[in-house]
Image (cartoon, rainbow, N blue to C red):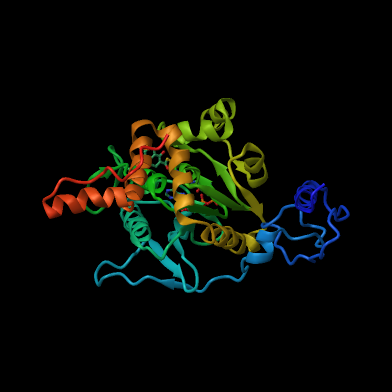
Amino acid sequence: MADRQRHRLAIIARHLAPEGAADADPGTTFHAALSPSQCSNAASGARKLSSYERVHGSVSRDLPTWVPVPQPAGQEFQDILYEKSATDGIAKITINRPERRNAFRPLTVSELRRAFDLARDDTQVGVIIFTGKGTEAFCSGGDQAVRGKHGYVGDDNIGRLNILDVQIQIRRLPKPVIAMVAGYAVGGGHVLHMVCDLTIAAENAVFGQTGPKVGSFDAGYGCSMMARLVGQKKAREMWFLARFYSAEEADKMGLVNKVVPLEKLEEETVVWSREILRNSPMAVRLCKSSLNAVEDGHAGLQEFAGNATLLFYNSEEGQEGKTAFLEGRPPDFSRFPRLP
Ligand SMILES: CC(C)(COP(=O)(O)OP(=O)(O)OC[C@H]1O[C@@H](n2cnc3c(N)ncnc32)[C@H](O)[C@@H]1OP(=O)(O)O)[C@@H](O)C(=O)NCCC(=O)NCCSC(=O)c1cc(O)c2ccccc2c1O
């Protein structure tokens, strides 16, 4: 067998080998300083690193220094915090109403919309962590104290259900949004974590829909996305009975990506963010868009097609059309191949 083939086989065997199995390749052994998040079968601590791991190493588990992003005078956030890591492209948006279990009112919703827009427009930001202040709750849904006849009522006395716009904003945002959940994620707060791309939960997290108990329901993403995540039977159970589920149960149902001890929650979420950040932003963007497209009908197609246009504008062929127009000449598309 050629050396190259033997080498490839050894690499494959190494990847397939059970934990702690003897090395298939007699090359250098690397005693990994790998985080479990980097390689779930690295628990033995002594296994060979792949060439990718040798080149890239592991991401830092250090907690970032969070720097508040200053807002224009008179427009300072009251119900949320908007911060960025001093050293990584991570933004953090925090509902800051712990005394209400981070329930949202219209002001909270309008501030969330502004913060998600800021994170979207900031080309330095590649991942957004969405969380709630404190350890008691991620979010307990709409603030029932300000619920009126047409929705949740703010200073303008108009009832609104515009958390639905935040759900769509998170869904369409071309960067991953990670829900970092400690404590209760219930009611409209549960829907918010579901529309995020990923959810990292603390062991104390509690999940559930409460709407039917308080005369409400979210029959949009709240029902449809849940059914995609946990299946029809479980989704009906969650909505009809409005029970609460532990982090462990949520994990088993496929509602969350990872459960960690409360004291490790931010560290783990930041590690996941950093692993995403070192990957190709366009590849990640297109994967999110594609995963949306298959479910979102025309809206999904429109989002995905926008990415195609974005890439095409950057091509010589796309540029030729614009340049020819500006120069007042017919475009010369003849040099561009009609690929099979
Ligand atoms: C979340 C809880 C399970 C926490 O219980 P716990 O015992 O830990 O804490 P307390 O109950 O004592 O709460 C502390 C404090 O916070 C207040 N509070 C908590 N949640 C809310 C809330 N959602 N609204 C207002 N206030 C809240 C609580 O009253 C206490 O205040 P004190 O003054 O007494 O100290 C438990 O709190 C709980 O079950 N909360 C209610 C959860 C709920 O039913 N949420 C609303 C569901 S409906 C919804 O969210 C919703 C919103 C939308 O905008 C929609 C839009 C379109 C369609 C559907 C929508 C929708 O369904």
In the picture as drawn, the residue positioned furthest to the front comes out as 335
Where does the C terminus fall, quadrant-wise?
top left
Q: Nearer the viewer, residue 244 or 308?
A: 308
Residue 77 visible? The answer is: yes
| 8 vs 189, nearest the viewer | 8
Residue appearing at x 34%, y 32% in the figure: 298
Of all residues, the one furthest to the left in this rendering is 328
Q: Can residue 203 be seen here? A: no
In the visual, does 329 lie left or right of 40? left
Residue 143 or residue 259, whichever sits in front = 259
**x%, y% of residue 153?**
28, 47
Q: Residue at x 57, y 29 (%)?
A: 231
Q: Quadrant of residue 229?
A: top right
What x and y, as percent, mark residue 314? 33, 53
Residue 52, picture quadrant:
bottom right
Query: Which residue of the protein is positioned furthest toward the right in this rendering?
Result: 22
The x, y position of residue 335, in whole percent, is 30, 46
Q: How many marks?
A: 0
Task: Indicate whether 19 appears above or below 239.
Answer: below
169 up-or-down from 34: above or below = above
- Name the one closer to the observer, 17 or 244: 17
Q: Residue at x 57, y 55 (%)?
A: 182
